[in-house]
Amino acid sequence: MAPQPDEESAAFWAAVKEHRLELQRCNACGRVRFPPMPGCPYCGALGHDTTEATGSGTLYSWVVVHVPLTPSAAAEVPYTIGTITLEEGCRMVARIDGDPALRDGLALAATYVDHADWTEVRFAAEGR
């Protein structure tokens, strides 16, 4: 299902459509955050700049989905959803492509899947 961008996430989804990861960086404390939001979850300040992420990260946690949540996802199971610690310091949740030997700290790189009306960020083991 396609995401429904709002005022805060529209720039993120526009960058993803161009196969780039754009993250918010707090103007006050300098920390990078995800998901996009109006205020900093670390210091509470409003205001941010954007920074382009490298797309590299490491696997923090994962779960293998065996039961589809919707009938349209039935052909996709099993698949892996992971929490990725991005090189910039924040974490995001995304699908893990391929069949790597999953382990904490596994090096991952962003990949992009273009759907009919949106683009999805996924991750795959680096070097694959």
Image (cartoon, rainbow, N blue to C red):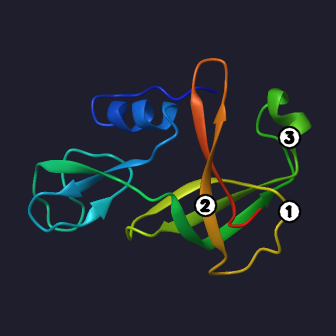
Could you tell whether 59 is left or right of 89 in the image? right
- Mark 3 sits on what residue? 76
Q: Is residue 59 above or below residue 105?
A: above
How many numbered callouts?
3
| Nearer to us: label 2 or label 3 | 2
Q: Is residue 128 above or below residue 79?
A: below
**Residue in the image at 29% along x and 36% along y:** 8
Q: Position of residue 6 (x, y in %)?
A: 34, 28
Q: Amino acid at mark 3?
A: Glu
Helix, strand or loop for disc 3: helix
Q: Position of residue 95 (x, y in %)?
A: 68, 52
Q: In the orientation shown, which residue stands out farthest toward the front?
A: 127
Could you tell whether 109 is left or right of 68 in the image? left
Q: Is residue 78 above or below residue 10?
A: below
Residue 99 - label: 1
Image marks 2 and 3: residues in contact by CB distance under 8 Å:
no
Image marks 3 and 1: residues in contact by CB distance under 8 Å:
no
Residue 109 - label: 2
Task: Give the distance between the C-alpha atoms of the residues marked 1 and 2, in whole angstroms.
Answer: 14 Å
| Nearer to us: label 1 or label 2 | 2
The answer to which quarter of the image holds residue 53 is: bottom left
Q: Position of residue 64 (x, y in %)?
A: 79, 60
Q: In the orientation shown, which residue stands out farthest toward the right?
A: 75
Helix, strand or loop for disc 2: strand
Helix, strand or loop for disc 1: loop
Could you tell whether 12 is left or right of 106 in the image? left
